[in-house]
Image (cartoon, rainbow, N blue to C red):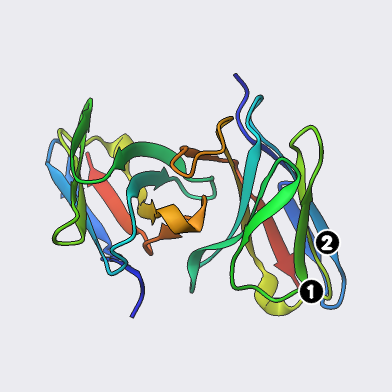
Amino acid sequence: QKEVEQDPGPLSVPEGAIVSLNCTYSNSAFQYFMWYRQYSRKGPELLMYTYSSGNKEDGRFTAQVDKSSKYISLFIRDSQPSDSATYLCAMSGPGSARQLTFGSGTQLTVLP
Amino acid sequence: KAGVTQTPRYLIKTRGQQVTLSCSPISGHRSVSWYQQTPGQGLQFLFEYFSETQRNKGNFPGRFSGRQFSNSRSEMNVSTLELGDSALYLCASSGTSGRVGDEQFFGPGTRLTVL
C-alpha cells in the first residue's frame, strides 16, 4: 500500500462547478501538506500549503487537513477551463527533511 | 524574482551513457531537491542538498548522484543509463532558513529519453 493514496480520475466537470479533490495517507508523522497543479509537460506549481490540521483559503481554492482521519482535500470553487490540469497532493514530516511524498495525481478537465 | 531554471530542457541518450542535469534555484534559496517523475511511479524523491551537503537521499541506486555548488546551483548525474531512466527530472528550490517546512518551488524539468 502506498503512503499517499489519490484517486487518479480522470475527473470531468462543467465550468462553474465546485471540484473536490482528496488524498488519504498512512504516515501519522506527516505535518506539512501541499497541493500542486501541473499542466501538461510543465513542472508542478505550488497552489496551497498548510501546516497540521485546519482549513486554508486562497481565492477560489480551499485546502482542508484532517490529521485525525489522515485525509486532506482541495476544493476549487467556480472552476474554469484554465483549471484543467493534474492536481498532486504532497506531504512531508519532521523526520524527512524536505522529502515530499506525492500522491499519484488527479487529472481534472473543466468543460466550457 | 526569477524562478527555478533547469538545463537542458530535453535530452536524448542511449543505454550505457551518462548524463548531467543542471538546476539553478531561486535567488537566495539554499536548498535544492531532485525528483524523478514517470507515468508508472509518479513523483519520487531522489535527494536534497543544503549548503553543499546532501541531507537526504531517496531509494534510488548509486548510479544516481548529485552535488551542490557554493552558489547553490546543483547538478545531478546518472551513469550507465537504462531504458527505465527515461523520465521528467524535476528540481525544487526552497527557503533560506533550512527549516523542514519551507515551501518547495519546482522548475520546468528536464525530459530525459533513453534509447
Circle 2: element type: strand
Q: Assess disc 1: are there few (<14), some (14-19) or many (≥20) residues with their C-alpha within 10 Å of its C-alpha.
A: many
Q: Which residue is mark 1?
A: B81
| Residue under the image location 54 percent in, 50 percent down | A41
Three-letter code, disc 1: Leu
User: Would you say the residues marked 1 and 2 are in contact, meaning their CB atoms lie under 8 Å apart?
Assistant: yes
Disc assigned to residue A31: none
Quadrant for the N terminus of chain B, please: top right
Question: Which is more N-terminal, label 2 or label 1?
Answer: 2
- Name the spot of residue B104 as percent of width and height, x first: 50, 41
| Residue under the image location 83 percent in, 76 percent down | B80
Residue nearest the observer in this picture, A22 or B57? B57
Chain letter of disc 2 in the image: B
Quadrant for the C terminus of chain B, please: bottom right
Is A92 positioned to the left or the right of B54 in the image?
Answer: left
Residue nearest the observer in this picture, B51 or A46? B51
Is B40 positioned to the left or the right of A36 in the image?
Answer: right
- Residue A101 figure quarter: bottom left
Q: Which residue is mark 2?
A: B19
Three-letter code, disc 2: Val
| Residue under the image location 66 percent in, 25 percent down | B27
The residue furthest top is B1
Is B64 positioned to the left or the right of B80 in the image?
Answer: left
Circle 1: element type: loop
The residue furthest front is A95
Q: Is residue A79 above or below residue B12?
A: above
Q: Assess disc 2: are there few (<14), some (14-19) or many (≥20) residues with their C-alpha within 10 Å of its C-alpha.
A: some
Chain letter of disc 1 in the image: B
